[in-house]
Image (cartoon, grey):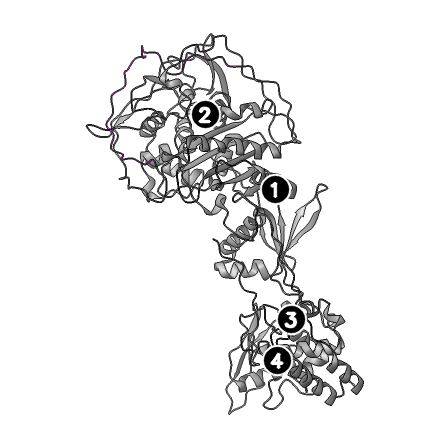
Amino acid sequence: MKRILATVLGIAMVMSLVGCTGQPEQPASSVVTSPTTATTTEPPLTVTFPDLKPYTESSSTVIYTQNAEGHWDEMLTLPGGNKRGKLTSFSAASQNAFIAAFDPGFYNHNGADGEALTITQRLLQLSNSADAEMLRRGAVEMEASHASKSEILEAFLNTVTFCDGVVGVREAAYYYYGIEAKELTVAQSALLAAVALDPAKNDPFSAPEAAKAARTTVLDAMLERKLINAEQYAAASAAALPASSHKEETPVWDYYVDLLIEDVIDDLMAAKGYSYEEAEEEVLRGGLKIYSYENVEKQKAVESVFLNFGFPGSSVNSTIFIMDYEGRVVATVGGRGEKTENRILNRATDVRRQPGSTIKPIAVYAPALEEDIINYSTVVRDAPILLDAYTLWPPNYQQQPMDMGWTTVKYALQQSHNTVPVRILMQLGTRESYNFLRDTLHVTSPQEIDVNLGALALGGFAEGVTAREMAAAYQVFGNSGVYNKPHTYYSVEKNGEVLLKHTLEKEQAISPETATVMNKLLQNVVREGTGSAISHHWPDMTVFAKTGTTDAYRDSYFVGGTPYYVAALWMGYDSFASMTPDQCSYQKQLWSQCMLALHGDKPAADFPLWGNVEGHYYDPYSGIVNDSYGNYGWYKAGHVPYEYNTIEATIYTPQTTATTPKPTTATTAKPTAAPTTAAPTKAPTAAPTEPPTTVPTEPPTTAPTEPPTTVPTEPPTTEPPVTTTTAADIPLE
């Protein structure tokens, strides 16, 4: 559970406030040494004079969202900020009551009034812990050189503290009477002043008799100083006390606002050097204007899917994170069920879970393709490696470790084989893979302990990853290889000053050519691979994706995108209990329904071809391009495989020793020492496990109104459909 909203801060006024807690926000201030008040027998006056301006302005933070016309509308005012105002916001009766209660000679003294604690001295206590004599001298200097009587009284009325987190007379007027401070009567004003003198003792709800007595004391003082007449005194003395509070109920906002608040806190910490607590205070009570990227209707649409989805079990949970290709967060849901509290756990950003096979495209295939270690149809030995004299690892899904011959990169990724990415990673290097994840794709959850085959090839990390990280990493496959940091707001302002502003900083994470080839490879997952269960949901929209399920079915991920959005969804038990294989399959359906809810107004679209790429037919037995028969693949120009190439099986020397992951997290991590069987130096004679398949003609698409554009469809192939079934054809995940 995340930190809940901090207690509304009050002011430690020196007035026997037994039972009240908290301190107010501290305004900007300056330390002034005043030689004019010093004498030869007195030390120099060194006090901090508070800037009173912040005490007279509302401190409520407001969130704005953009409407269809491009205008910014107020969406939400965050609770916790004080209702402040100018002196004209307070009735004359309320001003007189507080002067009579706290400083009867206010308008007649110069800041000090004998031994009595004046209102001016009380304000100085906000920023000083000086002794009584220093406060007395400071108050005289403050009134002489720093603030007028009206400014001092205005600040005092805005900062005087009541119980239950109520600060300021405007807020108290609403809390006790449900009215504005300018409407306060003599009786109401006298009661509020009485409560402020000792909130715990004079609370009208818990101690009505004490409250009446204290009110009478204030009325006596007002009458004595002719601030009221006898008739007003009698009427006020007979007035009934308030029966109940009018405290506003805090609305429950959505997960997007939760995320927005945390993002602004984090960015203020980075930009301003604040601690978490300081940044949180600024966001909740700093009077900020936050211009959010949230589209409320889109957020509601995804939340509605989660609320109405038929989850496979009463305790199975899930989360989703959706963004566009410019980094704007589109929607997020932190868990199943109705959201009943604010700033609660969001599993998409606050919880790390094992990604399983969804790690393969970003930790193995993409960096290997970027380095030209593989291409679309590279053939790789579909066989486990030898960990020691007796242990073969890893097995493929629902198979015993066995040598299945040779297969292509396209087929291995489509069917989520485990053996192939392990062998590719041995060529790439675990250190290179780890650095690519963290430095290039900004997936920073993996740690040094995860520099091993099991973590980087199969997703068995010590702690896991977040859905936010996964969605952001996968965007490069639908965005010409460009990475944009996910962001929830356009700018943050305070008093006309821009504190934070998002600027689009496009990082070319991988080449456009690598992005195109990876996009095409991941489309096969949805068309005919482990994600094909949702292919009928998207007859006219191109989708790329990858499935991921961990050992013992503790975690199930689905990550992918359309030409408009990219999303990562996790499903599993919070307790790390195992699901059934059938339960794991529900992650695809929930992902698809959430994304469909966002595409109702989007025209059908395909991804463009980025960079200098070429489409060719290739022989599925050898992976060699022949341009006359076989399956169809995509290649970087200059790297078309007209000659046979394989991933050579080499002896693997681990760059770091793998450590057993934490027992609370599902993992597939294994030892990393791995001698292997040498690969042949000529084309294999055994049939590969990627049989020739019919590549259907992709339906024509209409160019969308957003970045994607229409590209030609892949040419159809002429080979007959598969008529035999082998072990390699068993559906995975």
Q: Judging from the image, what secondary structure is the residue with disc 1 in? A: helix
Neighbours of disc 4 within 10 Å: few (<14), some (14-19), many (20+):
many
Residue type at mark 4: give it: Leu
Q: Earlier in the sequence, mark 4 or mark 2?
A: 4
Q: Identify the mark at residue 663; answer none if there is no mark.
A: none
- The answer to whether the residues at label 2 and label 3 have Cβ atoms under 8 Å apart is no
Residue type at mark 1: give it: Gln
Q: In 3D space, how far apart are the residues under numbered discs 4 and 2 (Cα atoms)?
A: 70 Å
Q: Identify the mark at residue 299; answer none if there is no mark.
A: 1
Residue type at mark 2: give it: Thr
Please check the rendered image and state whether residue 690 is part of the magenta-colored stretch, yes or no.
yes
Locate the C terminus by quadrant.
Answer: top left
Q: Identify the mark at residue 197; answer none if there is no mark.
A: 4
Q: In 3D space, how far apart are the residues under numbered discs 1 and 4 (Cα atoms)?
A: 47 Å
Residue 282 x/y as whole percent: 56, 60
Provide the residue span drawn in magenta: 668-695
Q: Identify the mark at residue 530; answer none if there is no mark.
A: 2
